[in-house]
Amino acid sequence: MSERIAELENRTRFEPAQIEAPITERWLESGLFHPPAQGEAGENYSIAIPPPNVTGSLHMGHALNGSIQDVLIRYHRMLTAGSEEPSQTKWILGTDHAGIATQAQVEKALAGEGVSRRELGREQFVKRVWEWREHYGHTIVQQLKRLGASCDYEDERFTLDEGYARAVADVFVRMYEKGWIYRDRYIVNWDPGSRSAISDLEVEERRETDTLYSIRYDLLDGGSAGQGPPRSSEIAGSVTIATVRPETMLGDTAVAVHPDDERYRDLVGRTAILPLVGRHLPVIADDYVKMDFGTGQLKITPAHDPNDFEIGARHDLDQVSVIGEDGCMTAEAGERFAGLSAMRAREAVVAALREQGRIVAEEPYEHEVPYSHRSGQRIEPLISLQWFMDMSELAKPAIAAVNDGIVRIVPDNHRRVYLDWMANIRPWCISRQLWWGHRLPVYYCETCAHVNVAVVAPESCSECGGHLRREEDVLDTWFSSALWPFATLGWPEQTPELRAFYPTNVLSTARDILFLWVARMIMMGIELTGQVPFSDVYIHSVIQAPDGRRMSKSLGTGIDPLDEIDRHGADAVRFGLLAMSSTQDVRYSAEKVGQGQALANKLFNATRFALLRVHASLGAAAAKELEPEPMPCTVEDRWILSRLAQIETDTAARIEDYDFSHAALGLYDFVYGELCDWYLELVKHRLPDLEVAQQRAEDARPREMLAATLLYVLRRTVALAHPLIPFVTEELWRYLEASGELLAGSPYPRADEGLVDLDAEVEIERAIEAVVAVRGWRDSVGARAGAVIPARLSAPCYEDTRELLARMARLSLTPDGHGAADAAEAVVSIAIPGGSVEILSTEGLDLQAAERRREAAQAKLREELERVQRKLSNEGFLAKAPAAVVQAERERLARLTQELEAL
RNA sequence: GGGCGCGUAGCUCAGUGGGAGAGCGCUCGCUUCACACGCGAGAGGUCGCAGGUUCGAAACCCGCCGCGCCCACCA
């Protein structure tokens, strides 16, 4: 117990704003968050933070995941703090360069100055982004500190750091040499917004209603596919194709039907004439075509549709690119349309077709349209020369790791989602036409066209010595993110950090980046380090707005966690988020944050009260010497120690099971429902002021024992709650712990099983039930709150709790078996477990209400009794239910009978 | 089209085989010597609907209705 108790006298409220900054300062100065790179990963504990975007700011997802990871980190740091075997706990911190997002931000800022990035030039632009990063790159890290996140702030990484960049280049070269990375002309998801290719995973489908046009293409007479505009005499029949994108027809190079389609068997091998263009299109058979959709005749545009691209490859069709990287029609689309945006071109094409009478039907059509997750613009599938990575070999061990449980996914219903995706994994388009990012370590020879790939830029071509030109493209941001858990620790060098903290223990994230990031880390980790990067993947909730919509700035549904911290304190926000979290999406609950705030304040006041009371009751000198330890004198002491042991077991188990909401709410229930509502109220009177006690000539020993027990319980509770609500608990530790040690570096309480006392629990629970019953009765009959009512206890099993029942229910209990008093007439009976309390005086009571209440109580007891009797007379129940259940029902019957008789 | 999940008190959610719960809100009472961001007491629920399994179902199974999310190449 610390000497500074007097400070607490006037602090009747916990004020987070006053203590959060100084406490953060003490934590940072202590070095607790910056462990030495000692030992091996197997004996240490580490988590690599999902690196936030460098120019981002803390949103609810960060706040939740930060709280979760911090609980795990603080728990393990404390768990091993008292241990004899040395163990380090590290939360690896850093930020992600976030290619497209950051580049877009800077471009936007430049636009404000009236400059485009092309005007600035690559070198100057990249310089500007670095400056931007210097300016805004520390925001989110500072915000994590406000949350109380105990990351290793002294060892912050960035995915574009020099060492990290070397690791990225190194991986590229290795994968290239294995033949997994290759360059290809392939149809990609082109994002006209960021003017770059993006990966499949960065595409989101939106439901939209478009017009489905049915267009008639004429068929040439005969089978030959001769060139030149047809003369009308050569036309023989037609096909009707359906499309929502008429503008792409300008790039059609075939018409397809299903090979089994009886209706069109004769068409295969014939030639259709592409309206507006006149190109001759072979009619081909491909089983991709659905016979039961539309007319069963499909236009094939290999350059602008992923399916058509595949079909084109199978049939060796021409690729005619009519839409360019700017989203506008190319020269190949013909003079009439070239230069128009795709949307404009659509109108123009439709108008031209309509003029020719070729549109035979139009209908509204709802379908999924691809949009860029990054820029929000509609994806334009087109053929482009890009770099790809083949994932099939990488996926195999990553599938096995999850199948074999070497990587555990929690909750495990995400396991199958992961496995399904991995089983069908496709090549990954890794090149981006951006300037901000890891430029590919690829050098083209201007003389012999040889492709040089090397970590360090070669002087000249390895084949011919010719001049080299470096690839302009950069890598997909997720390529570097995939190396996060080990590249942050110095890989490919075998550093002490890598040895001490890799593999990490847990990766915590929302499910939206399970494929984008988590799966790729597992694949890359296994391939490059021979070990899985983490043994557990914890997938946490997505927090939605209170109305169930997505939380987003643009919708105006966002809630800023920092505002919430300002208002309620970091502990409250952490507690609230943890209490909300679940295995599924949840709505933001201001009430849960309020609950957290209340808990922090409650714990603060409970501790304050206990310390002040102990101080006043033992005197300053004795209080200072006091050694907190369990020294139970009474049944309530044994009860609270037993309950404490139980909540200690439960909390540790819940944290280890990633059951954060129950860990949080369980602590709340213990602090409120047991420690404060009952234990403190029960023992108050046992700690009178020192002078009073001395006047009464009381022995100091019972007070010392109670003080020792009380402070033991509070210290343990405060320490137990620390990983969830670190600020208030650290603040209280200053008063509870004389040595000045930080709670963050102190051992975590582990249940003392020897303190479990089920008899005490039964007794106190019974007494609490009785108190509640009497209080309810008092309230309903209008008894004054403070009035002490004469009564007689008519129930067994209250030997040790008789006094506390009287005190808590404000009864003056007549001693049993004492002549005159015992003979007093009972005017009212109140049912309590195992019997009744008989009220001996009616002064100031509403007797009609009392009677109504008695009747209601009787009715309820009868009803319950009947149900139990029914159950016990059911032969099926007696024969088939477990003996313990039958026994419990028998006991219940006895108890209810007793209570009913007492009324 | 495939998959995952949800539907319990006015609201947000726990509870997954044996007496319907919490927080907030609401009602009543209380300046009770830690806390009025407090204390005490209370009202409020055919556990989405219908069937089945079981001695016993909010929970397990089948179907239906409603809602959400993820994946997927039907123009």
Image (cartoon, coloured by chain):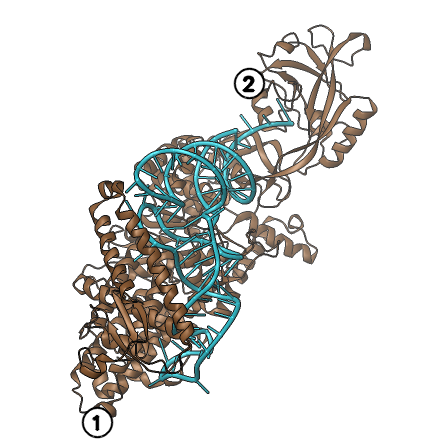
Kindly indicate which chain is depicted in brown in the rendered structure.
A
- Which structural element holds mark 2? helix
Residue at left offset 66%, top offset 28% = A321
- Which structural element holds mark 1? helix
**Can residue A472 be seen at all in this image of the molecule?**
no
Can you tell which quarter of the image residue A210 is in? Answer: top right
Task: Identify the mark at residue A314; answer none if there is no mark.
Answer: 2
**Of A417 and A380, the residue lying toward us:** A417
Name the spot of residue A336 as percent of width and height, x first.
Answer: 79, 29
Name the spot of residue A572 as percent of width and height, x first.
Answer: 44, 66
In this rendering, is residue A210 above or below A899? above
Q: Are marks 2 and 1 on the same chain?
A: yes
Mark 1 belongs to chain: A
Q: Nearer the viewer, mark 2 or mark 1?
A: 1
| Separation of residues labelled 2 and 1 (CA atoms) | 103 Å
Which quadrant: the N terminus of chain A? bottom left
Mark 2 belongs to chain: A
Q: Earlier in the sequence, mark 2 or mark 1?
A: 2
Q: Is A421 situated left or right of A351 in this image?
A: left
Which quadrant: the C terminus of chain A? bottom left
In this rendering, is residue A624 above or below B38? below
In this rendering, is residue A660 above or below A372? below
**Of A305 and A738, the residue lying toward us:** A738
According to the image, label 1 marks what residue?
A695
Name the spot of residue A328 as percent of width and height, x first.
Answer: 71, 36
**Of A490 and A26, the residue lying toward us:** A26
Residue at left offset 36%, top offset 35% = A399
Q: Colour of chain B?
A: cyan
Amino acid bearing label 2: Arg
